[in-house]
Image: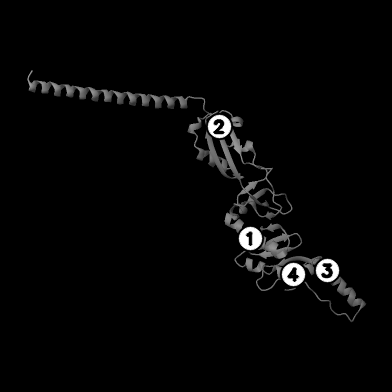
Amino acid sequence: MLEADQRQAWMRSRRNKRKTARHARVRQFLLRYFLMVLLVGTGIYFLANSSWRLGNLDKDIIVRGNNYSGTTQIKKSLAAYLNRPVFEIDPKNVEKDVEKLESIKFAFVRRYIFPRPKLVVIVKEEFPWASLSNDPEREPAYIVAESGRMIPVKKFPSYPRPPMVISADFNKAKKMFSPEEVKQWATWIGYIENQAGEKVQLVDLRRQYDVRVRTEKTLFRLGIPDTTLTTRLGRISSIMETVAAYRDQLEYVDLALDNNIPLKLSKLVKDKKVATKTAAAAAHPQISEISEVENKPL
């Protein structure tokens, strides 16, 4: 065989080997692709038709972090997720459904498949700030949280009721309390307690133009809670000695004015004073006058 023929045969052999190797790689790629598609499809089918579903509220949903909110209440709010594959459940949607409960501030949800499918719900509850009633003489119907959220007492009977009561119309209170408003009122209440040395028991907001605050011993009329209220509250410490002197006769301390602080005496005390003054004048004509302290500006 000539050298040229040998070279052509060698080149033809090389070309055939390359084609064979290329075809082998293509077959391997197609086989791998087919196996991958088969594996993914089988996995999806298996997951969609497997028993990895939430089948029981009591066993498959675990609630943690709830001290006052009922575990049963939280689980019932998630009843729509029963008989659904765990991997199809969006934790964000579950968290939103749990946070619809008035007593829940935040919720965090984790999904588990092994050893059995389940949801773990971790909650953070609202912190109670004050009790809310539409009448000071009635039992509170709501708990006002620090976030301004109103928590119904009937729905959450085990929720703690703060000793401080706010009296206001329920419909107006829903728009009245925002996180900023609660923070402002907490500042004012703390200011009153520090100035007067007495704990605040009641904040009467039924009339927005005539707000009143009752402490353990004293009733303060605040008037309109505007930007001047902080300045007006700053005078409390300077009058408490005088207030103590008229404690038995005092109806309330009027802080609604900017210039002075009148002390309002009860009507019964005034009637007694008039009778005492008349009797004293009859017995001692030389006594012509008894000093009055009603509405005395300080």
Alpha carbon distance from label 4 to label 3: 17 Å
- Residue 251, position as x, y percentages in the image: 76, 65
Residue wearing tag 3: 271
Alpha carbon distance from label 2 to label 3: 73 Å
Q: How is the image coloured?
A: one colour
Pick the quarter of the image with the N terminus: top left
Of residues 251 and 276, the one nearer the viewer is 251
Q: In the figure, residue 4 lies in which quadrant?
A: top left
Q: Do the numbered discs 4 and 3 sit on residues whose CB atoms are within 8 Å?
A: no
Residue 266: tell me if it is visible. Answer: no
The residue at the point 55 percent across, 32 percent down is 118
Tell me the tag on residue 263: 4
The residue at the point 87 percent across, 72 percent down is 276
The residue at the point 59 percent across, 42 percent down is 123
- Side (left or right) of 67 relative to 24: right
Lower position in the chain sequence, tag 2 or tag 3: 2
Label 1: state its secondary structure.
helix
Alpha carbon distance from label 4 to label 1: 24 Å
Between marks 2 and 3 in the image, the one whose residue lies nearer the viewer: 2
Q: What's the residue type where badge 4 is placed?
A: Leu
Lower position in the chain sequence, tag 3 or tag 1: 1
Q: Residues within 10 Å of mark 3 (few under 14, many from 20)?
A: few
Q: What's the residue type where badge 1 is placed?
A: Thr
Residue wearing tag 1: 187
Most extreme residue toward the bottom is 286
Between marks 3 and 1 in the image, the one whose residue lies nearer the viewer: 1
Most extreme residue toward the top is 1
